[in-house]
Amino acid sequence: MSLSLVHSRALLGLQARPVCVEVHLANGLPSFTLVGLAETEVKEARERVRSAIQNTGLEFPANKRITVNLAPADLPKDSGRFDLAIALGILAASGQIDAGKLKGYEFAGELSLGGDLRPVRGALAMSLALADDARQSGQAPPRLVLPEGSAQEAALVPEAEIYRAPHLLDVVRQFLPGGTAPDVLDGWTRVEPTSTQRPPDYPDLADVKGQAAARRALEIAAAGGHSVLMMGAPGSGKSMLAQRFAGLLPAMTTQEALESAAVASLGGRFTLDNWAVRPTCAPHHTASAVALVGGGSPPRPGEISLAHRGVLFLDELPEFPRAALEALREPLESGSITISRAAHRAEFPARFQLVAAMNPCPCGYLGSSLRACRCSPDQVSRYQGKLSGPLLDRIDLHVEVGALAANELINTPPGEASAHIRSRVALARERAISRQGSTNQALEGQAIDAQCHLDDAAAKFLNTAAARLGWSGRSIHRCLKVARTIADLAGAATVQLTHVAEAVQYRRALKAH
């Protein structure tokens, strides 16, 4: 009898939990049993591993009773990430490689039938988990062996020691019995931490002509981390403005870039070209609630998590399923989403900036100076009623985007460039963070009173506006936070009447004109 242990990791949400792959070879009727709450794609590893070992010229112990246990048994395992670890465990248990040399390594990779290693999802999450566990234990992190397509991604974590190998044989040669294997042999290579890529190239807001009110609202939203709803006729430029919003946000910090990249890696969307680029996710209006907030078994991140530290753009907002829109209410407040299942729960970050766009009515021309609206009051009311009051209450800025006449578009100079606006936004954010340690949108409780203190004239104006417009307590607090952002953009130490007056303009409810 022979037993070997190989270490890997399973993904549960954004967490990469340690998994011990135990392989036992025994006499008896030949069989290959895989246990440990494995999904179908993990159980299929039996055929991949068998073929890969045989086709690479190694010996598969076909006359043995093979038992592979993925511990802990109550942790769900999915995908083909355990193929490499299972293959190495079988080779170690059969004495073809030195089991002692496997200590201090973790492995992940899917095997082809010929022994090639294929990329796996969540390599960056695994690397982050290794670094975090090492920090907590005070020990050096284990070395992580990954396929070529995943190793460069995992090397974005500075503390991690990552090795890449394109083929099973490249890994096996490192752990042969006998002398110490060299650091570089054939395809086995240590991957150095990836340097920062070129500066992100976002679409420029200078492409948008006119629309001074909408541009101002986007600048305020970017400076304070606020959500925006743009209303206007078809073709007025709402989508064009939203697609350029990410270019107004300050450059990502290394920690923000790692968080964003880790979630993108879980969704299979990360590439090195996207490093430190704020994502803009724009799901179609037919997206379900699970597609937006995440779900499935095991849980996968939704669009709100894939937009973490970036922008979630919802075009044609009233056309989204009501259940999908209502699911956004809690993440807009908390900045995270928890997906609970019978046995497990997974938490994903979701600190995104919501930019939504809609027409004012079904035909789209309510209030337009260019075309007459053909909708009845009942149709307008029904259309706007698709958006619930609680959801609208959580959107900080409501701005109307008017249609532009031909003379405002043809032969007119470009608007202000994104770089100029971004410099003002970055300065305003620095003021907020140095003062309170967070953006203004994240202020809560007593911090709102402390940072948004109003003089008598501003307080009286806000009280009158709130009473006339029937605002909730949340609406009042959000107006205060927007006013604080406007004051930061102006370089003012206190929130004044002019700042509150401008903030009130952005809290108007939808209504027929």
Image: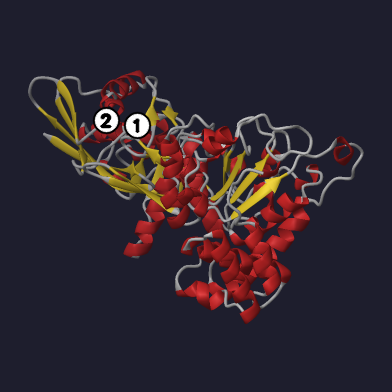
Q: Give the structural element (helix, strand or loop) at label 1.
A: loop
Q: Going by the picture, which residue comes out furthest to the left?
A: 28
* Picture residue at 48% right of the left edge, 49% below the top: 389
Which residue occupies the foreground of this view, 263 or 71?
263
| Left or right: 100 in relation to 332 | left
Residue 501, by quadrant, is bottom right
Note whether 61 is above or below 215 in the view shown: above
Residue 163, by quadrant, is top left
The percent coordinates of residue 87 (x first, y second) are 29, 31
Which amino acid is tagged 1? Ser
* Picture residue at 55% right of the left edge, 34% below the top: 378
* Residue 184 visible in image: no
**Which of the marked residues, 2 or 1, is nearer the chain's N terminus?**
2
Q: Tag 2: Cα neighbours inside 10 Å, few (<14), some, or many (≥20)?
A: some
The percent coordinates of residue 440 (x first, y second) are 56, 66
The percent coordinates of residue 398 (x first, y second) are 62, 51
* Picture residue at 34% right of the left edge, 33% below the top: 84
Which residue occupies the foreground of this view, 63 or 50?
50
* Residue 42 visible in image: yes
Note whether 357 is above or below 31 in the view shown: below
Which residue occupies the foreground of this view, 283 or 3?
283
Q: CA distance from mark 2 to mark 1?
A: 8 Å
Which residue occupies the foreground of this view, 246 or 149?
246
Which amino acid is tagged 2? Glu
Q: Give the structural element (helix, strand or loop) at label 2.
A: loop
The percent coordinates of residue 207 (x first, y second) are 79, 42
Marks 2/1 in contact by CB < 8 Å: the verdict is yes
Q: Which mark is residue 79?
A: 1
Q: Which residue is mark 2?
A: 39
| Model colouring | secondary structure
Q: Quadrant of the N terminus?
A: top left
